[in-house]
Image: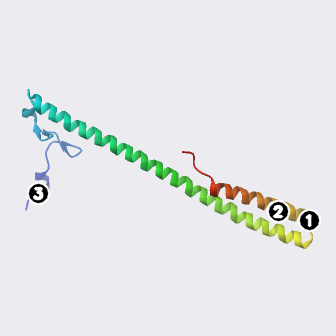
Amino acid sequence: MTDSADSKPKNSILGLSTDELAGLSADELNNNPVAIKMLLHYYRQLVDENGALKNTNNTLETYVSAYTQQKSDAATSAVLLAVSNISIGFGVNLLTGGTTWPGVASLITGIGLAAAGLYFAFRRQAS
């Protein structure tokens, strides 16, 4: 059975071997323009891949941010609409019972809360 520590390179940074860069040892790179160009090409590939990963990460962070805002807006809207239904119900009950001003005040409050709830439910995020 082989030990997994023996199969890993002794000198590595973030899992990349420092003994061999792009499959080339330091001796092969010494005074070898072709090997140095190969190393720089390999480095350029890593830089390009890193840039692509940063773009992907930024896109996903934007999606998470938009989802979090939408989730918050949905919760706010649900609470406002539930409270508005209760207020409208009290307002209609008071109006049918003969007490006009408290019924109208409760009804107007409920309609205002319903409008605020609908605003949060249907507002669009700024792009």
Instruction: Quadrant for residue 126, please give it.
Output: top right
Quarter of the image for the N terminus: give it.
bottom left
What's the CA distance linking mark 3 and mark 2? Answer: 76 Å
- Residue 112 on image: x %, y %: 76, 57
The residue indicated by pointer 3 is 3
Which numbered disc covers residue 83? none
Residue pictured at 24% horizontal, 36% vertical: 44
Q: What element carries label 1?
A: helix
Q: Dot 3, crowdedness within 10 Å: few (<14), some or many (≥20)?
A: few
Callout 3 amino acid: Asp
Amino acid type of the residue tagged 2 in the rendering: Ser
Q: Is residue 100 above or below residue 40?
A: below
Whole-percent x, y for residue 76 in the image: 64, 58
Which amino acid type is shown beneath numbered disc 1? Thr
How many numbered circles are shown? 3
Left or right for 59, reference 106? left
Tag shown at residue 106: 2
Task: Measuring from the top left, give residue 105's x and y in whole percent.
Answer: 85, 60
Q: Which of marks 1 and 2 is nearer the N terminus?
A: 1
Q: In which quarter of the image is the C terminus?
A: top right
Residue behind mark 1: 100
Mark 3 or mark 2: whose residue is earlier in sequence: 3
Q: Do labels 3 and 1 touch, CB within 8 Å?
A: no
Q: What element carries label 3?
A: loop
Decide: is 40 above or below 49. Answer: above
Marks 1 and 2 close (CB-CB < 8 Å): no
Residues under labels 1 and 2: Cα distance?
Answer: 10 Å
Q: Which residue lies furthest to the top in this view?
A: 31
